[in-house]
């Protein structure tokens, strides 16, 4: 198992990194491996200049991270993990057996039904294997939040209806509540179980990637500990209405993800640095800046990435783009000034013509 080319370049073993990329991408005349190697080398150099502090504390506060905005990334992964717990998986795990009991299922049968629910949960994770790269991380979270929210409100309402139903109807209504418990865990396994663990590995620069993943675990620990400690009190106080709280959190996650979390699908680590170069926390500003920076620094986004290779998949021709670093800046204002200077010069030439 060879070392990662990014890590090799990071520690100064560039020739080894170049060799491994050549073996992976091929040493053909298309220059695929060389283009990706130049991108990695450029971005490692940029990270070394802008990432002055890489300790956990410095990452959390974003000290001296410059245009990399490491602190913002830490906040995103921590809160995504906390939201993962508050959308209700812990509540369903704790309250599920009670729903089974209300449905009239015997304690003996509750055990195998709970086990069957866990098996359904496990197999549902396979769904994202086929959907995650097709629809992206954001849309995976969107449809998960919608489905989970519906299941939470339905399970809560049906749990109350089961308790109020006549003896002859309890089994049917309770069975419907049980169905929504199964459906919730299946949707969670296909969506929100996966993305919060994947996201940290896709947004942090190479210099801080390992620590970034560790911050994700910190977020999970906070969210999990918080909910587990609070849920018994919630269920004792408001009973099945706690599920409505989780349903509301699911609804709230949709605008949160839309406004704050950039898409990472089909983007390299190098491109994510450009996405997070925006000073604004809002995703639409980040995407706008990303388009500007792609024009400003084409060498940083020319890496061979899935679906966007430097080689055109249809014609086989190498796409245009300089491999030589220009200003290596993540400041869009500098680019805008440069363009203004070009425009002024063109006007002066036209004036004297």
Image: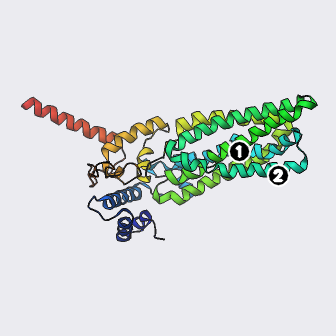
Q: Residue 307's x, y, as percent?
A: 40, 48
Mark 2 sits on what residue?
Answer: 112
CA neighbours of label 2 inside 10 A, class few (<14), some (14 to 19), many (20+): few
Q: Residue 100's x, y, as percent?
A: 84, 42
Q: Is residue 238 visible?
A: no
Q: Residue 92's x, y, as percent?
A: 76, 43
Badge 2 marks a residue whose secondary structure is helix
Residue sitting farthest toward the left: 353
* 114 on left or right of 218: right
Quarter of the view holding residue 237: top right
Residue shown at the point (28%, 54%) measured from the top left: 325
Residue shown at the point (39%, 59%) measured from the top left: 44
Q: Is residue 197 visible?
A: yes
Q: Residue 41's x, y, as percent?
A: 35, 60
Give above or below for 34 relative to 75: below
Mark before the other along the chain sequence, 2 or 1 = 2
Residue shown at the point (81%, 43%) measured from the top left: 95
Mark 1 sits on what residue?
Answer: 185
Q: CA distance from mark 2 to mark 1?
A: 16 Å
* 55 on left or right of 94: left
Badge 1 marks a residue whose secondary structure is helix
**Closer to viewer: mark 2 or mark 1:** 2
Which of the numbered marks, if any, corresponds to residue 2?
A: none
């Amino acid at each position: 198992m060879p070392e990662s080319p990014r890590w090799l370049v990071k520690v100064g073993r560039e020739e080894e990194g170049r060799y491994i990329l050549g073996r992976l991408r091929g040493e053909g005349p298309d220059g695929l491996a060389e283009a990706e190697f130049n991108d990695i080398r450029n971005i490692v150099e940029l990270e070394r200049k802008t990432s002055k502090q890489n300790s956990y504390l410095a990452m959390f506060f974003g000290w001296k991270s410059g245009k990399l905005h490491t602190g913002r990334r830490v906040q995103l992964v921590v809160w995504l993990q906390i939201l993962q717990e508050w959308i209700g998986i812990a509540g369903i795990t704790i309250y599920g057996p009670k729903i089974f009991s209300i449905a009239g299922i015997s304690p003996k049968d509750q055990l195998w039904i709970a086990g069957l629910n866990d098996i359904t949960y496990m197999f549902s994770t396979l769904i994202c294997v086929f959907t995650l790269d097709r629809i992206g991380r954001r849309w995976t979270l969107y449809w998960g939040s919608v489905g989970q929210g519906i299941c939470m409100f339905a399970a809560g309402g049906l749990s109350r209806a089961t308790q109020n139903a006549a003896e002859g109807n309890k089994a049917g209504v309770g069975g419907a509540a049980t169905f929504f418990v199964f459906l919730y865990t299946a949707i969670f396994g296909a969506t929100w179980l996966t993305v919060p663990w994947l996201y940290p590995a896709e947004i942090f620069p190479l210099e801080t990637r390992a620590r970034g993943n560790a911050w994700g675990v910190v977020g999970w620990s906070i969210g999990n500990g918080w909910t587990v400690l609070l849920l018994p009190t919630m269920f004792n106080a408001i009973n099945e209405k706690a599920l409505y709280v989780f349903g509301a959190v699911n609804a709230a996650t949709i605008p949160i993800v839309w406004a704050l979390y950039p898409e990472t699908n089909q983007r390299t680590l190098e491109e994510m640095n450009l996405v997070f170069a925006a000073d604004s926390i809002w995703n639409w500003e980040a995407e706008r800046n990303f388009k500007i920076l792609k024009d400003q620094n084409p060498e940083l986004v020319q890496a061979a990435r899935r679906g966007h290779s430097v080689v055109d998949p249809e014609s086989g021709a190498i796409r245009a783009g300089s491999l030589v670093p220009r200003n290596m800046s993540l400041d869009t204002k500098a680019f805008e000034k440069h363009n203004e200077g070009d425009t002024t010069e063109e006007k002066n030439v036209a004036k004297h013509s």
